[in-house]
Amino acid sequence: MDSSSLLVSPFTSLIELGGLLLVIPLMLPVIGLLLALMLGGRFLGRFMLLLLLLGLIAALAVATAVLTGGDALLYHLGGWAPPLGVALKADGLSAILLLVSAVVILAVGIYAQRDFRVPPGAPETRASLVFWMLLMGVWAGLNAAFLGQDLFTLFVALELLTFSAVPLVALDGRAETLAAALRYLLFALLGSVLYLLGAVLFYGTYATLDIALLAERIAGAPSLPPPIVAAAALMTVGLLAKTALFPLHLWLPPAHAGAPPAASAILSALVVKASFFLILRIWFDVLPGALNPMTAQILGALGAGAILFGNLIALRQARLKLLIAYSTVAQIGYLFLIFPLAASAESLALTGGMLQVVSHACAKAAMFMAAGLLAGTLGHDRIRDLGGSIRVLPITVLAFGLAGLSLIGIQPSGGYLTKTLLTAAVDGTGQWWWGLVMQAGGLLTAAYLFWVLGHALSGPPSGQVVARPGRAQELVVLALALAALLLGLLPPALFDLVGVGRAGLDASAAVSTAMAGAFGWSKLWGDVWPILVVGLLVLGMLPWPDRQANASERLAATTSSVTGHWAAALGAILERADRGLRKWPVAGLSLLVLALALAAAIATGS
Amino acid sequence: MNGPTLFGLCGAALVGLGLYGLICQPGALRKILAFNLIGSGVFLLFGVIAKRGGGALSAAGLGVDGDPVPQALIITGLVVAFAATSIAVALLLRLAEISGRSTLERAGSGSHSPTHERAPAPERAA
């Protein structure tokens, strides 16, 4: 029995459905929504778990069918082919995202069983019903965005996603989360209306919204007509606003940090990836020839800005959930390095980018849920008061650390593969500046992880334990963290999924080259020593237990030293810049400026 | 100036007005209304494209004057915009009920939500 038949055997009957298989991931969440209305909140969690499990099986079947079939799955709704009908299609990228979102949502579903259950005898709460309905809405929106082949279907999918994600932020009904949700909704609406305007211009020019037909018609033209230049710029900027790429990240930190932990995990791990995926679709599927160097450099520069700025601001955060939210701002940046690197090293850049999507989804969901367990147990999430939490929640702190290793990019994590593949692409294209940014980003990530872990590991437990988390919750967080950390150990042949439906992409060769030398001593040492130096620097600043008494004096002493003074001043300036950038009029204007810059860049190149 | 051009310019003007309102007006209700202005502008533009014809049906040689596809999409778009507006208004009403606020930025502080109190001093890790 060779490996491919071994892969296929559990799903034979599902794979025989062919394109019809794609309807299942769209139907399951909708069934869940309707069931929720009938069942009410009391026993809903268990039913949802069953649906999520079925969803995982369907996603596995799609991925297997795409990988072993070597071609994309296609389905015409109602048998009507485009341009009259609407198509669903799962290529390699869609299959990967379907699978990752099924895994992460299942994990979140297991985690949320405890947070949103209704104790026997107690009256049913609204959150216990609404959370599951919104989760199903998010899942439906994600799957539709990954499978849709029509720009308008994708618009509806994005809106479904936003309308489900926004109320998740405000689930606890406090004033500050309501304000965060409103800010998120309004900025996302600005993004989606710009996307819709772009879609209208596409339709006006080519009389179709189907991605494959558009690509065909655009490839035939000698240069991009002006409406399409405007449409590409508007759609990209609109989607950037929804992805919260720096400097359009005004809504992300309060929304992701204020939501309940299970919701934060979904928002940070998956929701921002859907709009990023549509940017990929536009630039790699609709307009494959139009990604000129100038446009790519603009997108890359925004990504680099996100990596540096997000990580530096994360270092300044006092609350764990805000730190993780700013880390998301930074990690989104890596995704946009794909664009400048894809020009001459598409295999490396796209594979690296997809690995970043997958590993960040698993790691960030694990981190947000770990932070939720810490906050639930200690009653707060102030980093300075995390002292001794390793003794209260050993598994959770371990999971947080392991997920962090993946973000830093230690072998064999998905983060390591991303960094190695993108670095190889940097070497191949000679754009050394992106390499520097990635190195700096990894070290800054290490700094804030050591800062958190140092507090969690040192000292006696401060304050009392408010509530104990469930064992299943801790284990599911650990499992997600391990998934991110061990991603590189998967057989390289599986990574070929990235290239299905895309000519000339050899993902497995790229991955096996990257993994080949990963565990050699010199490579290992070369990757680890800068991180150790950062670790020692950070640990040197922690208030250790035996010096607890004079910690404040040491604090004053270090801060008054020259370097401490400069670091503090730089931090204050950055924080002020962040507050300025996140003011609504400033963010709105930067969005317009960005749209103009992108349009100019696209026009000069075409 | 023929009809489609006039309506196209009207659509562009609505989008421009809406963008100005969405970015510059501090009140959240005004932002919601401005979003609806942009939406109307986009739908009007889509209507112009439908009137201009040359859509999928006439491209297929069915000899249909005008294009019905954008009209179907406009209706869907209206439903989506209506849903968006109702969620935004519901959030704003609840926010005003709890805290008396009707703006996104807190009055006076110029900053954002209270979850963002300044870090006491984690700058030492930087």
Image (cartoon, helix red, strand yellow):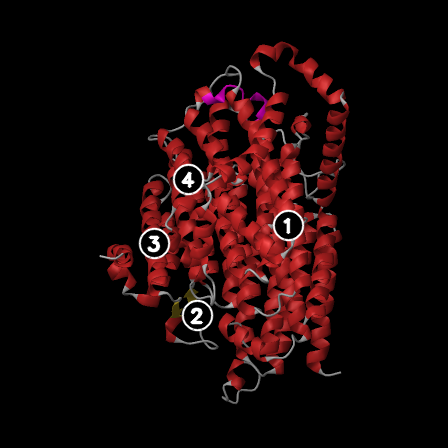
Give the number of the mark in front: 2 or 4: 4
Within 10 Å of disc 4 (Cα), the crowding (few <14, some 14-19, many 20+) is: many
Q: Which residue is mark 4?
A: A480
Q: As shown in the figure, which amino acid type bears the numbered disc 1?
A: Trp
Query: Are circles 4 and 1 on residues that touch, CB within 8 Å?
Result: no
Labels 2 and 1 share a subunit: yes
Which residues lie in the magenta part?
A381-390
In the rendered image, the vertical position of residue A258 relative to residue A134, given as above or below: above
Q: Which residue is mark 2?
A: A87
Residue farthest along the left direction in this orientation:
A1
Q: As shown in the figure, which amino acid type bears the numbered disc 3?
A: Leu
Q: Between disc 3 and disc 4, whose residue precedes? A: 3
Q: Residue placed at 56% from the left, 33% from the top?
A: A529
Q: As shown in the figure, which amino acid type bears the numbered disc 4?
A: Leu
Quarter assignment of residue A298: bottom right
Q: Between disc 4 and disc 1, whose residue precedes? A: 1
The chain letter for the residue carrying disc 1 is A
- Label 3, label 4: how far apart the Cα atoms are: 17 Å
Quadrant for the C terminus of chain A in the image: bottom right
The chain letter for the residue carrying disc 2 is A
